[in-house]
Amino acid sequence: MKKVVIATIKSWNIRNAYKFKELYKDKYEVVIITDKRELSEKNIRSINPEWIFFPHWSWIIPPELYEKYTCVVFHITDLPFGRGGSPLQNLIQRKIYHTKISAIQVEEGIDTGKIYLKKDFYIGIGSAEEIFIAASQIIFFDMIPYILENKPIPQAQEGELIVFKRRRPEESNLQKAEIKNLDDFYDFVRMLDAEGYPKAFFKINNLKIEFSEVHKKSNKLVGRFEVVYEEN
């Protein structure tokens, strides 16, 4: 039986990893890793997987893994457009709502690997978390099964190279953002609304107001806010 490692974080990806494991238990021996300490060369050597998939991983993948094993990472841009950090937020800020999920071979450069597969993906509505959940469904139940069954030969990236910069927490400040209309406000709040992300906010003296769950309702926006008192 083929051995497959899925290394991932975020609650929605972990749930789907276990669903995938159950769904394909008769075809693949699936090992799920959610702690970077388990992604050691010694541990992976003991498993000896044919594939290692990284649906969402926040740490550097060491060369002793990607040089020996077939490692695949997923990126929400039409690579080579959008290499780098915070791809979803950078796309939404640029008003690019039609994108792709790229499955790429891990190598030394960031998001520079050859492409196994791309899938069309729409990000024009919904919170970042809702978008990530939708992407997770495609990755686990469409892209990974396709790669395992068809073993596509990865192809070199082609097209315009654009590199994104990873966003910093202070960039979530609404008072420093370029917001000209309701659509800009909607995009700014929703693109930061996900587990583990610094939400859109502004400050009034020692009060920090954070925004989430924003929705369009005719000619206005409705949502949720939380007020936090912060000591100087």
Image (cartoon, rainbow, N blue to C red):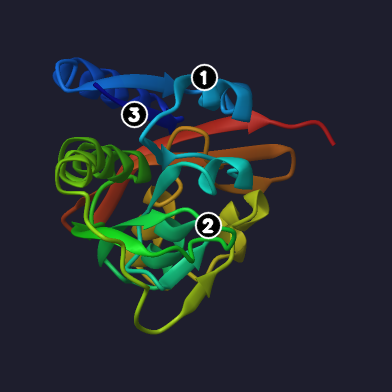
Give yes or no for contact between labels 1 and 2 (Cβ–Cβ under 8 Å). Answer: no
Q: Amino acid at mark 2?
A: Glu
Residue plotted at (61% across, 64% down): 176
Q: Amino acid at mark 1?
A: Ser
Left/right of residue 131 with respect to residue 81 in the rendered view: left
Front: mark 1 or 2: 1
Viewer-proximal residue among 11 and 70: 70
Secondary structure beneath dot 1 equals helix
- Other-residue count near label 3 (Cα within 10 Å), few / some / many at <14 / 14–19 / ≥20: many
Residue plotted at (50% across, 56% down): 86
Q: Amino acid at mark 3?
A: Val
Q: Which residue is mark 2?
A: 107
Residue 217: image x %, image y %? 19, 50
- Other-residue count near label 1 (Cα within 10 Å), few / some / many at <14 / 14–19 / ≥20: few
On residue 132, which mark appears? none
Q: Which residue is mark 1?
A: 46
| N-terminal label among 1 and 2 | 1
Residue plotted at (64% across, 54% down): 168
Residue 127: image x %, image y %? 32, 45
